[in-house]
Amino acid sequence: MDSLITAAARALAAGDPIGALKRVALREDAPALALRGIAMAQLGDFVRAKALLRSAARAFGPREAMARARCAVAEAEIALVSRDLGWPAKALDAARATLETHGDRINAAHARTLEIRRLLLIGHLDEAELMISEVNPTPLPPALQVAHELVIAGIAMRRLRTKMARVALARAEHAARDADIPALTAEVESVSHILNAPAARQVGGGEERLLSLDDVEALLASNALVVDACRYVVRDSRAVVSLSTRPVLFTLARALGEAWPGDVSRSTLVARAFRAKQADESHRARLRVEVGRLRVELGTLADVSATDRGFTLEPRNATEVVVLLPPVEEQHSAMLAFLADGESWSSSALAIALGASPRTVQRTLDSLSAGGKVQSFGRGPARRWMTPPLPGFPTILLLPGPLPGD
């Protein structure tokens, strides 16, 4: 490897893409193409970066399997950053295996981290946690240690283990100082801001207040019955009942939770659950049926008792009832939570991340676009969607993955 290639590689490792391009911008050999591709990716030109990396992979000879594997890992990272979740994960796994076979443990670890970050993004927390536990970060360079600790922090935040998340972020901050790469430092600061930002609202006893992730963790561990409108579950410290597929029942549970310890009139419940302006006898009959179903679903958590004017919620073991709401209530909030990360998403990537059909996602995007809440650029398969980050908008509680006890 010649001196210019070595100098360019060192510049990229230090987060200096301009310095790398000054050394290899006019060269067309395979190593230079690969380094130019990585430099363009660091500058944000992902389309050009992918084209250069693919050219480099073709230019490397059949005996240069390790070099081609490194190109595949770089392309996988670009796909992850640009939210191209349809990029073949098997290609990354094959590249990682090749790197391990040839003794390139650092780039193999980087490939493993990318696999874990993808799993975290789409909510496969159990798989991500298992894979990250198998990685020893000690021999890794500081930049990869930052990525490793951010993954640990991300998993901990999704699972509401805030102490673990803060410890991981402290290690990430220390590694970022050692790496001395401004982009890494900014990423650590961004995650720290999310950890300290309001994550939910608590409604109960006629009061409403904003909660941090620490507060949410403490609330879920307390002796309270929580009607969780972020995850559409009803839970106490012992059990969790999901009502995510029973919207009418959850609407009733939320209305009863917000009024506790008081009751809610039948006409109010009919209006909220069935969106009927006036309750007739058929609505009242349906309300009785749905209340009976809710009573069965809640089981040992709570009872729904009739009063003279309506119904009230009576927890069996908890000492109080609170309702947990997003800081900003918004239709299609889960999709907006993904788009609020500042990256551009394809509709197919959103479908993968949300576990929804591409047609449903496209209809939702069209609706949000008509309301001016999201914007797109490009056409056809290259079309991407994004929105400016919303101040105070929830991200952690709306993204996929189970909370404690789920």
Image: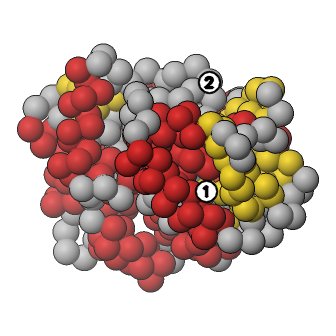
- The picture places residue 85, in percent across and down from the top left corner, at 32, 54
Helix, strand or loop for disc 2? loop
- The picture places residue 194, in percent across and down from the top left corner, at 66, 34
Tell me: residue 152, above or below residue 132. above
- Crowding around mark 1 (Cα neighbors within 10 Å: few <14, some 14 to 19, many 20+) is some
Find the residue positioned furthest to the left.
380
Nearer to us in this view, 47 or 278: 278
Mark sitting on residue 233: 1
Nearer to us in this view, 154 or 71: 154
- Residue 8 horizontal side relative to residue 125, left or right: left
Mark sitting on residue 192: none
Helix, strand or loop for disc 1? strand
Check the picture and name the quadrant holding the C terminus.
Answer: bottom right
Mark 2 or 1, nearer chain start: 1
Mark sitting on residue 392: 2
Nearer to us in this view, 294 or 155: 294
- The picture places residue 148, in percent across and down from the top left corner, at 64, 57
- The answer to whether residue 147 is seen in the rendering is no
Tell which tag, 2 or 1, sits nearer the viewer. 1
- Name which residue lies at 38% across and 54% down: 353
**Residue kind at label 2, given as amino acid type:** Gly
| Disc 2 and disc 1 in contact, CB within 8 angstroms | no
- The picture places residue 193, in percent across and down from the top left corner, at 70, 30
